Image (cartoon, rainbow, N blue to C red):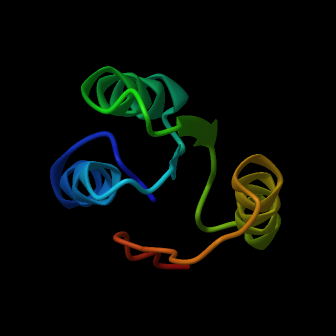
Amino acid sequence: MIAHSGIGLETSLLFAKEGANVLLVDINLPAAEKGASLINQRFPNVKALAVKVDVSKEEDIKSAVELAVKEFGRLDIMVRDRVVFV
């Protein structure tokens, strides 16, 4: 989920509040890491990770899904909150 601000961050926080581990993806890795750090501080029983992803590239998305499954054991929900024009 693109989650350094706005809807993406707030959605990530809500999932974490409910106990879900979250993978924050963004082309801006430092921003995603900031969001993951915030979640890890607020919800110490939740695992939040950040990864650089260009959502306009299918391979980046596939790699993010594989990382989520590797780190969390499964992927239950995927939220896309960006529109990509190509």
x, y (%) of residue 43?
31, 33
In screen coordinates, is 85 left or right of 70? Answer: left
* Front-most of residues 14 and 85: 14
Residue at screen point 47% across, 22% down? 30
Residue at screen point 65% across, 71% down? 75
Quarter of the image where the C terminus is located: bottom right
In screen coordinates, is 25 left or right of 3? Answer: right
Above or below: residue 53 compared with residue 86: above
Residue at screen point 22% across, 43% down? 5
* Front-most of residues 68 and 26: 68
Residue at screen point 44% across, 57% down? 20
Q: In which quadrant of the rendered view does residue 73 lie?
A: bottom right
Above or below: residue 58 compared with residue 34: below
In screen coordinates, is 20 left or right of 68? Answer: left
Quarter of the image where the N terminus is located: bottom left
x, y (%) of residue 32?
44, 34
x, y (%) of residue 67?
78, 52
In screen coordinates, is 13 left or right of 54? Answer: left
x, y (%) of residue 70?
83, 53
